[in-house]
Amino acid sequence: MGTVAIAVAAMGTISACGEGRSGGGVNAALQHPAVAPVHERTDPSIQSFLETTLPRGPGGTVVAARDGRLVHCRGFGMADREKKIPARCDTAYDIMSMTKQFTAAAIMKLEMMGKLRVTDPISTYLGPVPADKNGITLHHLLTHTAGLSDDEVDVDDYDPVSRDGMLDVVLKSRLGSAPGAEFHYSNLGYSVLAAITEKVSGVGYERFLARYLFAPSGMTRSGYVLPRWDRDQVAVEYDEHGRPQGRPHEHPWAADGPYWYLRGNGGLLSTPRDMFRWHRALEGDQVLSGPAKRKMFKPYVVAGERHGYTLHYGYGWGVADTGGRRILEHDGGNDWSFGEFARFPDRRVMVFWISNHAHREGEWNLQEQNADLTFGIEKRARD
């Protein structure tokens, strides 16, 4: 379900996310949505490409930016078919495994603050760990090389497990390989990083993101429960038969967000406009320093081969070079939705697209169209 998508498919699994009830805000921007909707921006070339490429049926939103400027942000289809609510630039979606980049950025921020180092063993923050896990460092968790394997544990994203309960399961699980030896995409590894974020910072995972990442990036509509979501702003998800599966927050959640088999590795809600704001923040040094970003986007380990090039994994990002073009990307998927976030830093182009209906059985599959859609949008944004 969750994958590093343009180049590699089916490397891991996550599930849908939710929002929940307001737990109080970190700042006013998180608490109060805009009074009036902002107009959508349409690039004729991108719109024409989408109209001839997208299948009929799914709903979603496409964003493209160039040189720090939003050139296209427009919805297609319906965010809620039953209520006939169209998808828009400011529709909120479960961004699924794209959540991992925010967890990685939180660790980078804590390193900038002098609170930890990515070379630290996890025992520094979790206390004594089983002997086979003594060698696991934060770097290993960030790059999916800790040896943790989601295949070794029988868990569900919506199981009502606490932070300590999740850590207990992870520490008792059997490793798929020795720490540092192999790449094994691990959702639970990122849940461990979220737990360490809380232990080191002394505040909740979402509150740390809100205070140190979202607010300085101008991201007013991203989070688990801190934003006061208008229910109709959040997209309904649809299965392979087109049946509604409800909004993400209608799945089992704790009062402060998803349970800990999902927290930190997926389930975050965000709008496409906010994802553009995040891209723009990553182009500057206000949120993360240049050295922190260079470390986050370094290609540490081979994650797979696809479309004739090799994809590496950095910290919460896939990194690839194809024909002299550098790509920083991560996708997300579950049983119902799918999305892709791709940045082309050498050309200062960003593409984000997401749909609340990933595939229709026997008819179409947006995950299979990912590369064509992403590169097609990027070409038109660049040209």
Image (spheres, rainbow, N blue to C red):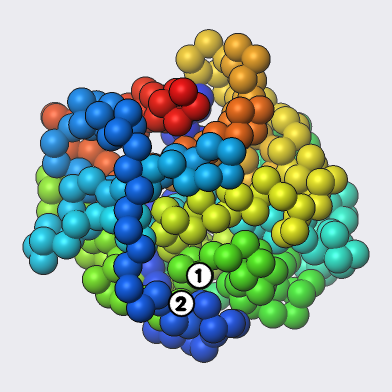
The percent position of residue 56, horizontal first and vertical second, equals 13, 36
70 and 191: which is toward the camera? 70
What is the count of numbered marks?
2
Determine which quarter of the picture holds residue 51: top left
Is label 2 in contact with label 1 (beta carbons under 8 Å)? yes
Q: Which mark is residue 351?
A: none
Compared to residue 3, the image places residue 189 above or below, namely: below
Q: Which mark is residue 220?
A: 1
- Residue found at the very far right of the displayed protein: 114
Amino acid type of disc 1?
Answer: Thr
- Relative to residue 356, is residue 209 drawn left or right? right
The percent position of residue 137, horizontal first and vertical second, equals 81, 50
Mark 1 Cα shell of 10 Å, populated few (<14), some (14-19), many (≥20): many
Q: CA distance from mark 2 to mark 1?
A: 8 Å
User: The N terminus lies in which quarter of the figure?
Assistant: top left
Amino acid type of disc 2?
Answer: Pro
- Relative to residue 311, is residue 13 drawn left or right? left
Res. 137 in view: no
360 and 141: which is toward the camera? 360
Q: Secondary structure at mark 1?
A: loop
**Which residue is at a point 60% across and 12% down the rendered structure image?**
323
**Which residue is at a point 65% across and 54% down the rendered structure image?**
281
**Which residue is at a point 41% across and 59% down the rendered structure image?**
271
- For marks 2 and 1, the one nearer the N-term is 1
Residue linked to disc 2: 227
Res. 247 in view: yes
The percent position of residue 30, horizontal first and vertical second, equals 51, 77
Determine which quarter of the picture holds residue 49: top left
Compared to residue 194, the image places residue 279 above or below, namely: above
